[in-house]
Amino acid sequence: DLFINCSITNSGGEGACLSISGDNNTVVQSVISGCAAAGVSVHGGDTVSLRGANTTVESNTISNFSRLVRTYRPGVAFSGVGLRVAHNNISHSPHACIQGGGSNHLFEYNRLEHCVYECIDAGAFYVGRSWAQRGNVVRFNIFDTVRPTERLAQKSCSQNAFYLDDQMSGYDFYGNTIINATQGVLIGGGRHNLIHGNKFVACDLDVAIDCRGLNWQNASCQKNCSATMGNMTTSCFANALNAVRYLQPPYATAFPE
């Protein structure tokens, strides 16, 4: 399907203004604003065969979303394999501007502006909790003003432009410019992440890295486990690898590391 030069505004409910599932879809040169929840939600491809979705979200203006549902309803929500999100202007979000999961996605030449202004422990670009999602590239994007503007109930410095949470792995983040963020990049454990060739301007802290897999999250990082984090029970991170049959092609061939 092709969505071109559309104008979608002031939706209600908890769903996205525009929700697309399947392959070979394009959302281009559209204006999406005032959504009660997410702006655009895209899903496609197959995580086991690594079949790419061939779906693109490009050259759109997405703003003032998450109007009623204030968290976890980003400007672009994504999942699956092989999506491209490029040349979009995504702005004015109380929580994340881009959020999701999957493999072999490309995010390039986007501008994310005035994000995470109402929350703690969040990212303008947020992904987390997987060893199995690999081959993702985030390059040549601009992050501008990632700071709280509301009076927060809990003190925290964790408003991040780019946030790899809870062992997130396999991201290549390069050529990006981060301006005026509380934190530029936060890497919360994980492996095989590359952060290189980026520019940081007027951030309180440019890059933060921790080793949570060696301490409080260690139980989740074992080969066979079931760990409890607060009130949430999480399975082993290894389970996601087993689900995609990571020792067999095509996964083992695509990601031999």
Image (cartoon, helix red, strand yellow):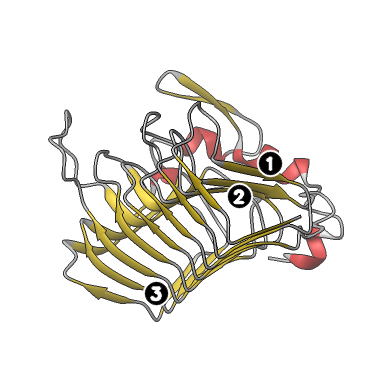
Binning the other alpha carbons within 10 Å of mark 1 as few (below 14), some (14 to 19) or many (20 upward) gives some
Q: Amino acid at mark 2?
A: Trp
Which quadrant would residue 85 be assigned to in this image?
Answer: bottom right
Q: Is residue 79 left or right of residue 145?
A: right
Percent across and percent down for residue 24 are 78, 59
Q: Is there CB contact under 8 Å for labels 2 and 3?
A: no
Camera-side mark, 1 or 3 = 3
The C terminus: image quadrant: bottom right
Q: Relative to residue 253, is residue 23 depicted above or below? A: above
Residue closest to the eye, 54 or 40: 40
Which numbered marker is on residue 240?
Answer: 1
Camera-side mark, 2 or 3 = 3
Q: Residue at x 55, y 65 (%)?
A: 29
Residue closest to the eye, 210 or 101: 101
Percent across and percent down for residue 233 are 53, 22
The answer to whether residue 188 is visible is no
Residue closest to the eye, 34 or 237: 34
The N terminus: image quadrant: bottom right
Q: Is there CB contact under 8 Å for labels 1 and 2?
A: yes
Q: Residue under label 3, please give it.
A: 176
Which numbered marker is on residue 131?
Answer: 2
Percent across and percent down for residue 169 are 55, 56
Q: Amino acid at mark 1?
A: Ala
Q: Earlier in the sequence, mark 2 or mark 3?
A: 2
Whole-number angstrom distance, CA of label 1 to CA of label 3 = 29 Å
Q: Relative to residue 6, is residue 118 depicted above or below? A: above
Q: Amino acid at mark 3?
A: Asn
Whole-number angstrom distance, CA of label 2 to CA of label 3 = 23 Å
Q: Relative to residue 87, is residue 246 depicted above or below? A: above
Q: Residue at x 48, y 22 (%)?
A: 232
